[in-house]
Image (cartoon, rainbow, N blue to C red):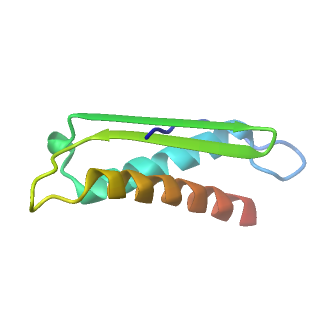
Amino acid sequence: MSEDASSERPTDGDPADEEVVRTAAEAAEGVVFHRYDQSAVTDLDVTVTFEDGVLDVDVYLNAPDGPDDPDPEAVAEAATEAAGEAVDELFEE
């Protein structure tokens, strides 16, 4: 799974594509590092695109999968969902 980001608002009041991407990526990374110590994450790739009003978020996570660790698939999915929710909130501002 994956994610990405950027900034600036156009004059019509909607956030700029770069701001949408940055907001989504930061939200996804925040979820991952809330659940895992940064040193425990072997690889994290967050890829976000926002084109023609369509948000696409992929989160690839390589992290411990022991009995006491969170499920990496579930964390990646939660990170993707958080990215979408953060962008929804951004457009509500």
Residue for point 74% across, 41% down:
16
The location of residue 4, given as percent across then percent down, is 53, 36
* Quarter placement of the C terminus: bottom right
* Quarter placement of the N terminus: top left
Residue that protrudes farthest toward the left in the picture = 67
Residue for point 38% across, 53% down:
30
**For residue 67, what is the image quadrant?**
bottom left
The location of residue 71, given as percent across then percent down, is 25, 57
Instruction: Please give the count of numbered marks on the rendered protein.
Output: 0
**Can the viewer see residue 93?**
no
Q: Nearer the viewer, residue 50 or 74?
A: 74
- Image height check: is 87 above or below 19? below
Q: Nearer the viewer, residue 64 or 21?
A: 64
**Can the viewer see residue 22?**
yes
Q: Is residue 50 left or right of residue 57?
A: right
Q: Is residue 54 left or right of residue 87?
A: right
Residue for point 69% across, 39% down:
50
Q: Is residue 67 left or right of residue 34?
A: left
The location of residue 52, given as percent across then percent down, is 81, 39
Q: Nearer the viewer, residue 93 or 82?
A: 82
Residue that protrudes farthest toward the right in the picture = 12
Q: Is residue 4 left or right of residue 88?
A: left
Residue for point 32% across, 41% down:
61
- Image height check: is 73 above or below 44? below
